[in-house]
Image: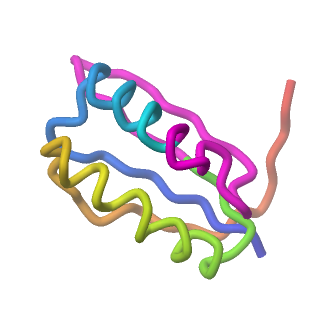
Amino acid sequence: MPLAFYFTNDGFTPEKYAQANSKLDAAGVSAPKGRTLHIATESEGAIQVFDVWESQADFDAFGPVLMPILNELGVGLNPPIVAEVRNIIQG
C-alpha cells in the first residue's frame, strides 16, 4: 500500500527548497524511484512537503541522498507524519 509523508521542517525557506531541488537534479535523483507524487506548499515563508511513495523501502532509499543536502542547507528536520494512502482523486 502506498504511503503519504507530510514534512514541516524548520527553516525550509523557498530559497532553500530551490537549492535542494537543484542539488537533487545535479545528483540525478530529482524524480526518485517509487515517489509518485510531490507537492510543496508555502505558508508564512516556510515550505511544507507532501509526498506519496510506493513503499517505505523506496522512501528509505532516498534518505541517504536527501538528508545530507537538507543538513548542508541548515534545514531543521522534524519527523514526518506518515499515513497509508487510501485514495487519490485528481480533478
Decide: is 71 above or below 18.
below
| Quadrant including the C terminus | top right
Decide: is 13 above or below 35.
above
Q: Residue 25, percent across and down?
A: 55, 38
Residue 37 occupies quadrant: top right
Q: Nearer the viewer, residue 79 or 62?
A: 62
> In the image, 78: left or right of 60?
left
Q: Residue at x 23, y 59 (%)?
A: 78
> In the image, 62: left or right of 32?
left
Assess whether residue 36 is covered by the magenta stretch.
Answer: yes
| Quadrant including the N terminus | bottom right
Assess whether residue 59 is covered by the magenta stretch.
Answer: no
Q: Residue 73, percent across and down?
A: 19, 41
Q: Residue at x 45, y 31 (%)?
A: 22
Q: Nearer the viewer, residue 27 or 17?
A: 27
> In the image, 91: left or right of 36?
right
Q: How is the image coloured?
A: rainbow
- Total of numbered circles in the picture? 0
Q: Residue 77, percent across and down?
A: 22, 57
> In the image, 76: left or right of 28?
left
Magenta highlight range: 25-50
Q: Residue at x 23, y 18 (%)?
A: 45
Q: Residue at x 67, y 62 (%)?
A: 53
Residue 4 occupies quadrant: bottom right
Q: Residue 51, percent across and down?
A: 58, 50
